[in-house]
Image (cartoon, rainbow, N blue to C red):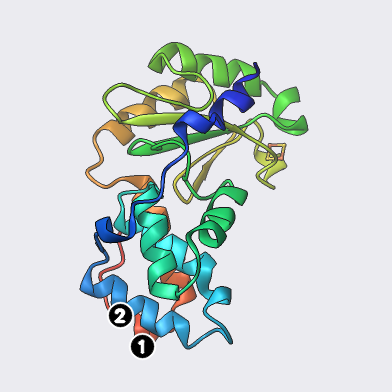
Amino acid sequence: MSELLQIGSPNERPRPPKADELNLKFSDQAVKELEGLKTHYPTLKACILPALWIAQREYGGFLSGEAIAEVAHRLKRSYAEVEGVATFYTMYNSVHKPGKHKIEVCTCLSCHFNGAFRIRDYVTAKLGIRHGETTEDGMFMLEEVECLNACDRAPLLQVGDKYHGPVDEAYIDNLLEDLRNREESTVVQMADQIVQCHLETSERVGKVLD
Ligand code: FES
C-alpha cells in the first residue's frame, strides 16, 4: 500500500462523538469570532470553511471528531457535511495530529529539479519521520506537498504561514533548532492568522498570535 493511502487509512479517521457526548470547547473569543463571521455569508453552510479554521486553532491544530462535531453543531449542519469539507482540503488537519510544527516540503517539478527529495530525505534522517508521520515527542510532522507557487525559491518548504527557500542542509539545521525553541505552535498560529484575515477589524476580539 502506498504512503498516501496509508495516511487515509480508515483506522485513523476521527469518529464523531455521540450526541450526548458533545463537549463544546470553543473559547468566548472563538464564539464571538464565529458570530461575526456568520454575518459575512448568506448561509451558515457558506461559513463552514472559516469556522473550521477557528476549530483548528481552538483544538490545538487538529480537527478531531469532536472539533468537527462542534462546527457542525454551531452551524446547524450535519456532521457528515462538515467532515466532508474538512477531509477534502489538505490545509485542514483532519486525519493526523500534525505535531506542534508541520514541515511541508514541496516535491513538485521545480523543487524536484533543485533537490527537494534530498531535502526531504535530510529532514527524514534528522527527525526519524517520513511523509505523514509525526515525531514521538509531538514536535514535528513531515509532509510532501504539491507546488506552493513560489518556484523561484526552489527547493522550498513551508512551516506555518512562512515559506523557506531556497533551503539547504545548514538552513534546515537552523530552522529545526529555531522551531524547537518556539513556544507557539506554528500550526495553531497559522490557523489564527487565517481566522483574523476573515474578520473585519472591529470583529478581532482576541490577540493575534505571532
Ligand atoms: S515546484 Fe516547489 S514551489 Fe513550485
Whether the residue carrying mark 2 lies under 8 Å from ligand 1 is answered with: no
- Asked if residue 80 can be seen in this view, the reply is yes
**From what the image shows, is residue 128 above or below residue 62?**
above
Residue under the point 66% across and 34% down? 154
**Which image quarter holds the N terminus?**
top right
Q: Amino acid at mark 2?
A: Lys
- Asked if residue 192 can be seen in this view, the reply is no
The residue identified by callout 2 is: 32
Q: Nearer the viewer, mark 2 or mark 1?
A: 2
Residue 80 in picture, x, y percent from top left: 53, 57
Q: Amino acid at mark 1?
A: Ser
> Whole-Å distance between the Cαs marked 2 and 1?
11 Å
> Looking at the image, in which quadrant does ligand 1 appear?
top right
Image quadrant where residue 116 sits: top right
Indicate the secondary structure of the residue bearing disc 1.
helix
**From what the image shows, is residue 70 above or below residue 98?**
below
The residue identified by callout 1 is: 202
Q: Are marks 2 and 1 in contact (CB under 8 Å)?
A: no
**From what the image shows, is residue 81 above or below residue 115?**
below
Of residues 101 and 94, the one nearer the viewer is 94
- 2 or 1: tag closer to the N-terminus: 2
